[in-house]
Every structure is written in structure tokens, then in C-alpha cells.
Amino acid sequence: MALKEDDIQPCAKSREAIEVVAWLRVLAYNVIATWRAGRPKKDRRPISWERAMELLRDALVFAEPERLATLC
């Protein structure tokens, strides 16, 4: 529920659609977890999941193409 994926129905309920959405969800969580692990820690604790998702969204939405290459 962290990505609010249960709030909308992204596609028709078919086996293939459900599998694709499940794989995209796993991929998204892994990207966020990897990016969050590389962020500087505050008081020896990682940033919150909510803040990590917010920062990553902003970085991807507002970044120039040259800066996107530095996220990897």
C-alpha cells in the first residue's frame, strides 16, 4: 500500500494483467529500496519510506537527462 496501488484498478482483471502489475510492483519496491539504501543516513537511521518515494519521484520528474544518468 505504500505506493497506493490499491486505490485504483490499472487494468482489466485477467491473469496476465495481474501478473504484470505484480511484477511492476516488485520492481518499483526494489528500485525504491536500492535508492533508499544509498541515501545519507540521519542519526544512523535510513530516511523513511515515504520520504524516499517523494525524493525519488521528484528526482525523476524534475531532473534533466544528464542528472538522471547519475542516479544509477
Image: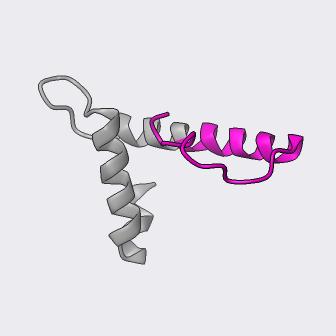
Residue 13 on the magenta segment:
yes
Residue in front for this viewpoint, 13 or 31 = 13
Colour pattern of the rendering: one colour
Residue in front for this viewpoint, 46 or 7 = 7
- Farthest residue in the top direction? 44
Residue in front for this viewpoint, 18 or 25 = 18
Residue at point 54%, 44% (across, down): 7
Q: Position of residue 26 (x, y in %)?
A: 62, 37
Above-or-below relation of 68 to 16: below
Which range is magenta? 1-28
Above-or-below relation of 57 to 28: below
Residue at point 37%, 53% (across, down): 56
- Farthest residue in the left direction? 43
Residue 24 on the magenta segment:
yes
Residue 16: image quadrant is: top right
Q: Is residue 14 left or right of residue 33?
A: right
Q: Is residue 33 left or right of residue 50?
A: right
- Farthest residue in the right direction? 15
Residue at point 87%, 44% (across, down): 14
Residue at point 15%, 31% (across, down): 42
Q: Position of residue 31 (x, y in %)?
A: 51, 43
Q: Position of residue 40 (x, y in %)?
A: 22, 38
Residue in front for this viewpoint, 19 or 72 = 19
Q: Is residue 72 left or right of residue 43?
A: right
Q: How many marks can you see?
A: 0
